[in-house]
Amino acid sequence: MKPRIALPVPNSHEQDYAARALPHYEHSILQAGGEPVIIDVTAASAAIAQEVKTCDGVVLPGSPADVDPEKYGALRHPRSAAADVLRDNTDELLLQDAYNMRKPIFGICYGMQSLNVWRTGTLVQDLTSVVQHKAGRAVIEAHPVAIDPASRLAGILRFAGVLPDGAAPTINVNSNHHQAAEILGDGLRLVAWCPVDQVKEAMEGTDEDHFVLCVQWHPERTYDVDPASRVMFQAFIRAAADWHQRLLLKQKDFESVPGKR
């Protein structure tokens, strides 16, 4: 049985963006061996919470919205986009379940920012840099990203044979964002950054027994052409499958206890 992956609709306001972006995430999850479960962000909270209980992992996708700066105690920057309350509410429900149950999490672009704020971190609301972080969908390699060689992400990329040796090995990534993590939230660590301007590009959870990986770029857009993108989704899906197997073992152990049903 394929692991079921909760995937919220990226945005409740811009249906064109959601229709354009969602198939990339679905394709990547399917090709990596998972079953995407689309979460309707306009549904009632109780229905969303019930749906996510049936899932083995969570992908938090990108979005044209920006996280409400009030959530991290900042005044709104003039260039901050409007918040998407329904998407934010959905992310919080999915994250609450995933952290409570130790389900794997893969955050992408806005998903990384959303998780960071949920974990009490803050954001840079509008980047100013010589690096073109908002290069857009058509640019497959926008800038380099340096990877912490001791990180889970480095291990995943080494498994794919795409990470060169070095004190801070680098890969080239696409890029389409104007905000980024500033202060990292509780239980998160920086594992990748742009070596030109030090913008934070990836973070992981600090608990070794909980797969939490977030990247600021868009591996779902390059799944078919980039080994690094593929192996990240594959590692996440493996973690979700392992989580499901552990759940089955726990249920089996519970049912084997005398007097339990």
Image (cartoon, rainbow, N blue to C red):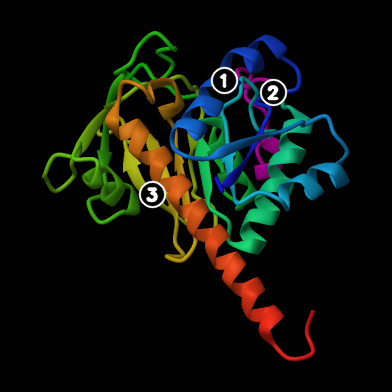
Residue 203 is situated, as x and y percent measured from the top left of the image, at 42, 47
Residue 175 in view: no
* First along the sequence among labels 3 and 1: 1
Residue located at (50% from left, 53% from top): 241
Gap in Å between the C-alphas at discs 2 and 1?
14 Å
Q: What element carries label 1?
A: helix
The answer to which of 203 and 96 lies nearer the viewer is: 96
**Secondary structure that dominates the magenta span:** loop
User: What amino acid does circle 2 point to?
Assistant: Asn
Extent of the magenta region: 69-81
Residue 118 is situated, as x and y percent measured from the top left of the image, at 64, 48
- Residue 8 vertical placement versus 249 (above, below): above
- Residue 77 part of the magenta segment: yes
The answer to which of 132 and 203 lies nearer the viewer is: 203
The answer to which of 127 and 188 lies nearer the viewer is: 188
User: What amino acid does circle 1 point to?
Assistant: Pro
Residue located at (65% from left, 18% from top): 18
- Residue 130 vertical placement versus 94 (above, below): above
* First along the sequence among labels 2 and 3: 2
From the image, tell me which residue sits under label 2: 11
Pair 2/1: label in front? 1
From the image, tell me which residue sits under label 3: 190
Residue 223 is situated, as x and y percent measured from the top left of the image, at 38, 26
Which residue is situated farthest in the bottom direction here?
258
From the image, tell me which residue sits under label 1: 23
User: What amino acid does circle 3 point to?
Assistant: Leu
- Residue 20 vertical placement versus 73 (above, below): above
